């Protein structure tokens, strides 16, 4: 978990948002009725994520704040992978499974994105 947290937080403040992150930021900063109305016509697949991110961005609207839930979801997924390895085999297997999961490039990539991939589509 500590490895995933370190990798997830490393370089989290890149200074810019890419197009999809910007869409997430703009949607999550809308009022709840505006989010509901928009989900009827665009981007409904990410609707739950926008609703989850809405109160987070209300506290502090920034790109780092927007990306933190993804980092925390990746940390939780790493813990689950490690726990599964411990339960199915032994603690050493759980440790290696967690470390391999945390250091997989695609996992660390999505852990740092302000999109719903790490939060709602964890590959478990």
Image (spheres, helix red, strand yellow):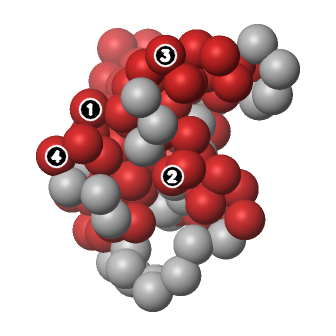
Q: Where is residue 42? Give x, y as percent.
A: 81, 28
Which label sits on residue 33? 3
Q: In percent of the image, x 38 and y 74: which residue is there?
A: 12
Q: In percent of the image, x 24 and y 42: which residue is there?
A: 58
Which label sits on residue 80? none
Q: Nearer the viewer, residue 7 or 93?
A: 7
Q: In this view of the protein, can residue 114 be seen by the observer?
A: yes
Instruction: Please report contact status of discs 1 and 4: CB closer than 8 Å, yes or no.
Output: yes
Instruction: Please report contact status of discs 3 and 1: CB closer than 8 Å, yes or no.
Output: no
Instruction: Please report contact status of discs 4 and 2: CB closer than 8 Å, yes or no.
Output: no
Per the image, the residue denoted by label 4 is 59
Where 110 sits versus 84, above or below?
A: below
CA gap, disc 1 to disc 4? 7 Å
Q: Where is residue 9? Give x, y as percent.
A: 31, 69
Which label sits on residue 25? 2
CA gap, disc 4 to disc 2? 13 Å
Within the image, what quadrant is residue 35 found in? top right
Q: Earlier in the sequence, mark 3 or mark 2?
A: 2
């Amino acid at each position: 978990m500590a490895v995933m947290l370190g990798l997830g937080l490393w370089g989290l403040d890149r200074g810019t948002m890419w197009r999809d992150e910007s869409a997430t930021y703009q949607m999550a900063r809308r009022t709840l009725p505006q989010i509901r109305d928009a989900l009827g016509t665009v981007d409904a697949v990410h609707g739950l994520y926008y609703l989850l991110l809405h109160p987070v961005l209300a506290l502090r609207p920034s790109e780092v704040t927007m990306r933190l839930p993804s980092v925390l979801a990746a940390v939780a997924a790493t813990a689950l992978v490690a726990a599964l390895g411990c339960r199915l085999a032994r603690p050493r297997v759980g440790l290696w499974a967690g470390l391999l999961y945390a250091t997989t490039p695609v996992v660390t990539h999505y852990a740092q994105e302000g999109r719903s991939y790490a939060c709602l589509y964890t590959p478990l």
